[in-house]
Image (spheres, rainbow, N blue to C red):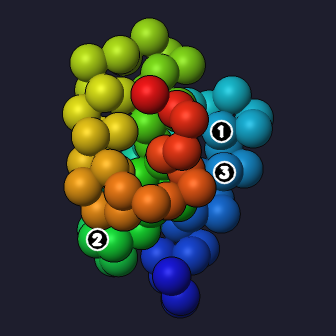
């Protein structure tokens, strides 16, 4: 991931660390829109949604992530 997508991912990570989860999800959404194959942004969005108790949405994101990259380190052992 390069350029604006990377910036959105990194800002999402910072916002997540600050506990600003909804804003983080919005940045992860933007990162994914800019790079649909971004497993990092998909994984982080999945994680944050789970922390918010949005488990169904988190599962949907996880399934999408598994479809993008079944061998990803993000998905190994997470099921």
Residue 78 got which mark? Answer: none
The answer to which of marks 3 and 2 sits earlier in the sequence is 3
Location of residue 21 with respect to 63 vertically, above or below: above
Label 1 close to label 3 by CB (< 8 Å) = yes
As helix, strand or loop, the secondary structure at mark 3 comes to helix
Relative image position of residue 74 (x, y in whole percent): 55, 50
| Residue found at the very far bottom of the displayed protein | 3
Q: Does 18 sit above or below residue 13?
A: above
User: What whole-number distance in Å separates the C-alpha atoms at marks 3 and 2?
Assistant: 18 Å
Q: How many residues crowd around disc 2 within 10 Å: few (fewer than 14), some, or many (20 or more)?
A: some
Seen in the image, is 54 located left or right of residue 67? right
Q: Quadrant of residue 11?
A: bottom right
Tell me the crowding category of disc 3: few under 14, some 14 to 19, or many 20 or more residues within 10 angstroms, Cα based. Answer: many
Q: Nearer the viewer, mark 3 or mark 2?
A: 2
In the rendered view, does 67 fall on the left or right side of 76?
left
Residue tagged 1: 16
Question: On the picture, is 23 further left or further right than 12?
Answer: left
What residue is disc 3 on?
13
- Is residue 57 shown to the viewer in this render? yes
Percent position of residue 40, x then y: 53, 60
Q: Residue at x 45, y 60 (%)?
A: 71
Q: Could you say where residue 28 lies in the image, as x and y percent from the top left?
A: 45, 54
**Disc on res. 36:** 2
Q: Image quadrant of residue 20? A: top right
Residue at 35% x, 16% y is 55
Numbered disc total:
3
Counting residues from the N terminus, which is met first, the one under dot 1 or under dot 2?
Answer: 1
Q: The residue tagged with tag 2: helix, strand or loop?
A: loop
């Amino acid at each position: 991931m390069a350029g604006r997508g990377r910036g959105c991912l990194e800002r999402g990570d910072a916002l997540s660390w600050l506990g600003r989860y909804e804003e983080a999800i919005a940045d992860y959404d933007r990162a994914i829109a800019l790079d649909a194959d971004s497993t990092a942004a998909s994984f982080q969005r999945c994680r944050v949604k789970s922390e918010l108790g949005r488990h169904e949405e988190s599962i949907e994101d996880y399934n999408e992530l598994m479809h993008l990259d079944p061998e990803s380190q993000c998905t190994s052992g997470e099921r």
